[in-house]
């Protein structure tokens, strides 16, 4: 007896999820910034408007336009065409650099407060996001940080040649100017004492402030010459450390290691090496960070595990390494095993240890009622960020371990929603949905209100200052950013993935004109069937199940129209060719929910 064929149901485009996933860059961004929308504005020179779209979502456009980890770019549809995604991150910087004075565009906090008081511990991106979102709704927010200025580890861990203080000051200032009370040079030493002050809610955004150490022979004896990477970077940022010896080894393969080695080059290191236990492709550092290190003549030596810090009565002589290789078991899990080759000794005078970061909560008492898991992280609701103390919330690196700035911002938005709901006595799981709309871009028979011609331009490389200059000044910003011409040219590489192909099956006469003209053969008229079978019968077989198929209702012939969203260029040729107007190009615009939004009434 044969089973019943499970036809693929017609695509429901009435909710927000379907088209949101099609806008790959926005879907990949933890804060769900409307990327194509602000890129189009940049292409037309409307930089201030582009900045404000970013400011609402990611809060720190100038900062993130320089140092974001760019999860949007690997997702960019353009990268499937010519292997180089749109330079989304650097276009964000364009909006920040070329905007006008946006003070008049910024919202104002209400004069009258709502009577609720919220304490934010730490002045990093997560806490600042919480402060901004809640201050706009009448909350009295107070930030406490042991630093002298806002920014947290954004200020202390990212070198000035990548992110100048002026940019941090500007964007943190927009938040503090909303009436947020800032208490700097203020060390919080007790959660019990904070809770005793009667705050309606407490948000913990203290980051992952402790660097992991390399506990191998010689570490204690040569301690004067071995430095924890994030602590060393902080000392450099504050001007406490102004030089380093000529021969430096950096242990680690993440972005902190890249910042350490590049900073060391600028402070006098002439023979600076990065030594990593993993393979080059497995390093956690962003590809562009590795490229910059190599560009600055810093070799990266892989598959070497440190065994011993070699010293002479405490004076560091170098590091002894074991050479390893990767082996994989039947489940694909990697294990590093010795190759049997002789150990390698590398001479050096200083070592910077950048092998990871850990959370540290020495100020949270064990008997306060806050539970931690076996990794030393707080036990949290992963949706609401609420801890086991109902009015205490976490976000950023302090919540689930080290991530990145844009993830901390996303955590801040969600925690602010939770705090708002908590203070209103509402269910924290009744979270407001994003707002979205679909608007036709049709101006005439073949005219659209957006540029739908696919640019043939290659990705623009950001111009930089000469190494001769930048390696002499640790505060001199390396990248110059795009000028307006380069910005416009790069912006035009965007495929406008948010301008969606919307199909009306009742208007279709099944002439197949759209399928014939489609440059990527992403449109097929065929019989319905099970999804695996349907994907195999398309004109261009679809193997990427990460994106759905757009399937129509049953047409007059009994067939269905199927479009593979994965390879669609959003060029609009199907809509231009259609004689009946069954296809339309409609712009999808989504803004993620923030504190103060309400659940729709049913």
Image: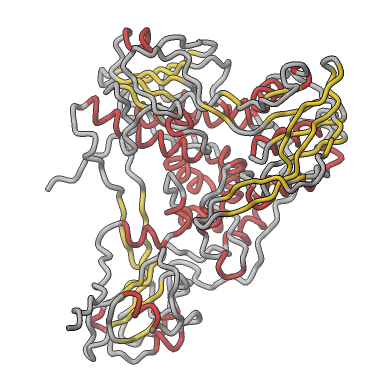
* Frontmost residue, 496 versus 151: 151
Residue 259 image offset from top left, x and y in percent: 69, 35
- Is residue 480 visible in this depiction of the protein? no
Looking at the rendered image, the quarter that the N terminus falls into is bottom left
Looking at this rendering, what residue extends furthest in the front direction?
340
For the point 28% across and 18% down, the residue is 200
Image vertical order of residue 268 relative to residue 499, above or below: above
* Frontmost residue, 263 versus 402: 402
- Is residue 160 visible in this depiction of the protein? yes
Looking at this rendering, what residue extends furthest in the left direction?
602
Q: Quadrant of residue 223?
A: top right
Image vertical order of residue 524 relative to residue 179, above or below: below
Residue 374 image offset from top left, x and y in percent: 42, 28
Q: Quadrant of residue 197?
A: top left
Is residue 287 left or right of 532 when viewed as pictured?
Answer: right
Is residue 48 left or right of 231 when viewed as pictured?
Answer: left
Residue 51 image offset from top left, x and y in percent: 51, 44
* Frontmost residue, 145 versus 332: 332
Number of numbered discs overlaid on the protein picture: 0
Residue 497 image offset from top left, x and y in percent: 45, 64
For the point 65% across and 53% down, the residue is 484
For the point 76% across and 16% down, the residue is 221
By what rule are the colours in the image chosen?
secondary structure
Is residue 437 left or right of 309 when viewed as pictured?
Answer: left
Q: Quadrant of residue 241?
A: top right
């Amino acid at each position: 007896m044969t089973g019943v064929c499970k036809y693929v149901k017609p695509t429901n485009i009435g909710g927000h999820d379907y088209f949101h996933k099609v806008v790959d860059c926005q879907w990949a961004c933890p804060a769900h910034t409307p990327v194509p929308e602000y890129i189009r504005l940049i292409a037309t020179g409307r930089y201030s408007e582009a900045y404000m779209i970013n400011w609402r979502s990611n809060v720190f456009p100038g900062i993130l336009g320089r140092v974001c980890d760019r999860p949007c770019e690997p997702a960019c549809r353009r990268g499937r065409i010519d292997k180089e995604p749109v330079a989304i991150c650097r276009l964000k910087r364009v909006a920040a650099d070329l905007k006008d004075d946006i003070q008049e565009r910024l919202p104002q906090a209400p004069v009258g407060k709502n009577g609720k008081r919220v304490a934010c511990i730490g002045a990093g991106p997560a806490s600042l996001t919480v402060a901004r979102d809640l201050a706009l709704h009448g909350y009295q927010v107070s930030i406490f940080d042991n630093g002298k200025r806002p920014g947290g580890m954004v200020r202390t861990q990212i070198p000035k040649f990548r992110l100048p203080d002026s940019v941090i000051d500007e964007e943190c200032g927009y938040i503090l100017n909303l009436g947020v009370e800032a208490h700097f040079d203020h060390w919080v030493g007790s959660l019990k004492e904070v809770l005793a002050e009667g705050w309606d809610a407490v948000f913990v955004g203290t980051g992952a402030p402790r660097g992991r150490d390399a506990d191998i022979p010689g570490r204690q004896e040569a301690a004067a010459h071995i430095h924890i990477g994030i602590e060393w970077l902080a000392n450099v940022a504050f001007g406490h450390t102004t030089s380093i010896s000529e021969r430096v080894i950096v242990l680690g393969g993440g972005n902190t290691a890249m910042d350490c080695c590049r900073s060391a080059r600028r402070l006098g290191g002439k023979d600076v090496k990065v030594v990593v236990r993993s393979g080059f492709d497995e390093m956690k550092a962003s590809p562009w960070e590795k490229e910059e290190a190599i560009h600055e003549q810093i070799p990266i030596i892989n598959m070497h595990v440190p065994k011993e810090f070699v010293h002479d009565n405490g004076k560091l002589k170098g590091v002894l390494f074991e050479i390893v290789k990767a082996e994989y078991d039947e489940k694909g899990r990697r294990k590093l095993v010795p190759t049997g080759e002789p150990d390698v000794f590398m001479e050096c005078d200083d070592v910077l240890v950048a092998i990871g970061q850990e959370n540290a909560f020495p100020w949270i008492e064990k008997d306060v009622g806050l539970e931690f898991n076996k990794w030393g992280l707080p036990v949290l609701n992963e949706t609401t960020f609420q801890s086991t103390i109902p009015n205490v919330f976490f976000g950023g690196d302090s919540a689930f371990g080290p991530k990145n700035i844009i993830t901390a911002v996303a955590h801040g938005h969600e925690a602010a929603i939770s705090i708002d709901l908590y203070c209103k006595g509402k269910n924290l799981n009744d979270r407001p949905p994003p707002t979205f709309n679909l608007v036709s871009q049709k101006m005439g028979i073949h005219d659209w209100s957006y540029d739908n011609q696919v640019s043939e331009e290659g990705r623009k490389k950001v111009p930089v200052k000469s190494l001769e200059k930048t390696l002499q000044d640790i505060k001199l910003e390396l990248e110059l950013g795009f000028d307006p011409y380069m910005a416009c040219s790069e912006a035009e590489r965007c495929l406008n993935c948010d301008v969606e192909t919307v199909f009306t099956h009742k208007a279709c006469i099944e002439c197949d004109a759209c399928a014939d003209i489609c440059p990527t053969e992403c449109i097929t008229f065929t019989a319905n069937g099970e999804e695996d079978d349907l994907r195999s019968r398309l004109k261009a077989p679809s193997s990427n199940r990460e994106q759905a198929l757009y399937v129509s209702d049953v047409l007059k012939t009994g067939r269905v129209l199927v479009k593979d969203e994965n390879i669609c260029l959003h060029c609009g040729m199907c809509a231009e060719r259609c004689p009946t107007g069954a296809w339309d190009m409609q712009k999808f615009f989504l803004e993620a929910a923030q504190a103060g939004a309400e659940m729709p009434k049913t």
